[in-house]
Image (cartoon, helix red, strand yellow):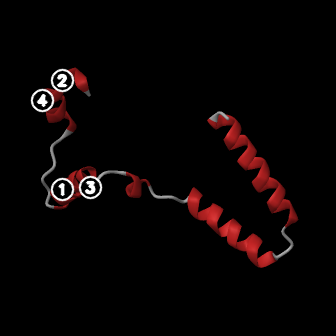
Amino acid sequence: MNTDLQIQNKKLELIQWLSTIEDLHILDKISDMISCERKKDWWDDISEAEKRSIEKGIAQADAGKLNPHSKARKIYGKRI
């Protein structure tokens, strides 16, 4: 069975199961889980190297080590 068909079948199974639930506590838990998934932070999905790079940039900005846009233009030219 191809993956797309498996996914569609699983969705239908879940929809059918969900439609039979009468326990408000369970429905609230499912709603909370869905809300948490929607609020997922991009920070959790980036690599450690990317996090270190961002943190380094924030530290430099906090220390006042900023360059104006005009200087970046001179350094990087048309790439930005």
Which of the two discs, 2 and 1, sits closer to the camera? 1
Asked if the residue at tag 2 contacts the one at tag 4, i.e. Cβ–Cβ closer than 8 Å, the answer is: yes
Q: Earlier in the sequence, mark 1 or mark 3?
A: 3
Q: Which residue is mark 2?
A: 77
Choose mark 2 or mark 3, whichever is in front: 3
Mark-to-mark CA distance, 2 and 3: 29 Å
How dense is the environment of label 1, judged by Cα within 10 Å: few (below 14), some, or many (20 and up)?
few
Picture quadrant of residue 6? top right
Q: CA distance from mark 4 to mark 1?
A: 20 Å
> SS class of the residue under badge 1?
helix
Q: Nearer the viewer, mark 1 or mark 3?
A: 3
Q: Given the current orientation, which residue lies at the most extreme top position?
A: 78
Kind of residue at disc 2: Gly
Look at mark 3 in the image and give the residue it sits on.
Answer: 48
Q: Which residue is mark 1?
A: 56
Q: Amino acid at mark 3?
A: Glu
Whether the residues at callouts 4 and 1 have beta carbons within 8 Å, the answer is: no
User: Pointer 1 and pointer 3: residues touching (CB < 8 Å)?
Assistant: no
**76 to 35, vertically: above or below:** above
Q: CA distance from mark 4 to mark 3?
A: 27 Å
Query: Disc 2 on helix, strand or loop?
Result: helix
Q: Which residue is mark 4?
A: 75
7 or 34: nearer the viewer: 7
